[in-house]
Each structure stands twice: as C-alpha cells, then as structure tokens.
Amino acid sequence: MIAIVDYGAGNLNSVKKAFDYLGAEVVVTNQPETVAAADKIVLPGVGHFSSLQALDRTGLREALLPGASAGKPLFGICLGMQWLFEGSEECIEMAGAGIFSGKCRQFSSSVKSPHVGWNSLTIQEGSRLLRGIAQDSFVYYTHSFHAPAVAETTAASEYGLQFAAAVERHNIFGVQFHPEKSGAVGLSILKNFCEV
C-alpha cells in the first residue's frame, strides 16, 4: 500500500487519481500510524516551504524518516522533494530532512518566476525512477525555488541555470516537476515508483 501524505499543502487528488489510474493500492492520509505502516510513501506538495512545518506539528516527520532510513521507498514531489534537502531560502528558520545536501534557492531575477509550464529533462543513466524515459522528455513544472544539482541528481532542467529535476539515492526519490500533470511521461515515472 502506498500512503500519500496529507499535511495540508498537497495536490492530493490529482496525485491519487494518477496512482488509481495505474491500479495501485493507495490511500491519502494525515495519520502518522498509517504512514508508518505503508509499504511506500509519497510526499507531494504545492506552496510555501513553511507549509512543511505541519510535518513536525502532526508527528508525520517521525513517521516518514525512520521508514526511509530502514529502506522504505519515499518519493517527494515538488515541495516534497525540496523537503528532502537541508532547507530552503523561502523559510530559513525551518530545516528540511537533510537527506540530500544543500538548500533550495529562488530563481534569479533574470528569468520569470515562478517557473510554470513544460520543460525538458536531461537524464542520467542508471535511474530506477526514470527507467525507460526518453532523453529530453518534457514534464510540467510550477515552482519559484529550485533544488541544487547534487551528486544524486538523476535529471536536470535548464531555467536561467541548471537545477535538479530529479534526485535518487537508494530508496529515496524526488522530482521537482509534477508527474501527475506530465501526461504519459509522468505516468511512466509513477509506475516506475510502484515497481521499485
């Protein structure tokens, strides 16, 4: 069973519908015990980084991290991916999970922000999440802050600079774009997550 974490800032219905379409057993929940019992966890998110403070208030952070440390697949989408890093300039007083190094930063004033719409992926070889996804495939973004390119970056996009579009380390996955809004490419990525 896949638990989609509801902390009050996610595009939950569209994420659930995408997994439903794939025939996955999925539940949307704000209950830490349900998250802890799930086989896999999806952490979606839209909005301000401070929204993630709800994970601390509700006990969901404590439900997420031990399972991830023990090898349970965890998939952060958009804001959920940014939480996997050390933090964000958008809310400097709040720490992220620190699974990946570095902080998320705002796009420079040289480009229109937020970055909204379709953009292509430069994909690295060997990614389980992006298995079978063609080089330069287009995915859908909506974000003002971006994660840095790190050693675990499995795909990057260009928007004024190169930033991490996807990251992966063992059982931990993250994408800055919205697979649930990215058509057939996004569905393939979600299917790959179901199969890890």
Image (cartoon, rainbow, N blue to C red):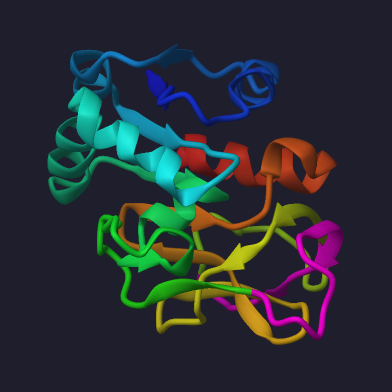
Image quarter of the C terminus:
top left
Q: Camera-side residue: 160 or 186?
A: 160
Q: Where does the image place residue 28, in percent across and percent down from the top left?
A: 46, 15
119 falls in the magenta region: yes
> How many numbered discs?
0
Q: Residue at x 82, y 41 (%)?
A: 184
Please report the bounds of the magenta region as a residue range. Answer: 107-126
Quarter assignment of residue 36: top left
Image quarter of the N terminus:
top left
Locate residue 44 relative to residue 50 in the image: left or right: right
Locate residue 160 relative to residue 189 in the image: left or right: right
Magenta segment's dominant SS is loop
Q: Residue at x 35, y 54 (%)?
A: 172
Q: Camera-side residue: 105 or 127?
A: 105
Q: Where does the image place residue 67, in percent across and percent down from the top left?
A: 17, 38
Locate residue 31 relative to residue 25 in the image: left or right: left
Q: Camera-side residue: 124 or 91?
A: 91
Quarter assignment of residue 92: bottom left
123 falls in the magenta region: yes
Q: Residue at x 43, y 22 (%)?
A: 6
Q: Residue at x 77, y 48 (%)?
A: 185
Instruction: Give the answer, above or below, for where 31 lies relative to 136.
Output: above
Q: Where does the image place residue 18, in percent across and percent down from the top left?
A: 68, 25
Quarter assignment of residue 124: bottom right
Instruction: Give the answer, above or below, for where 158 lies relative to 100.
Output: below
Q: Where does the image place residue 108, in percent across and percent down from the top left?
A: 69, 82
Q: Camera-side residue: 195 or 159?
A: 159
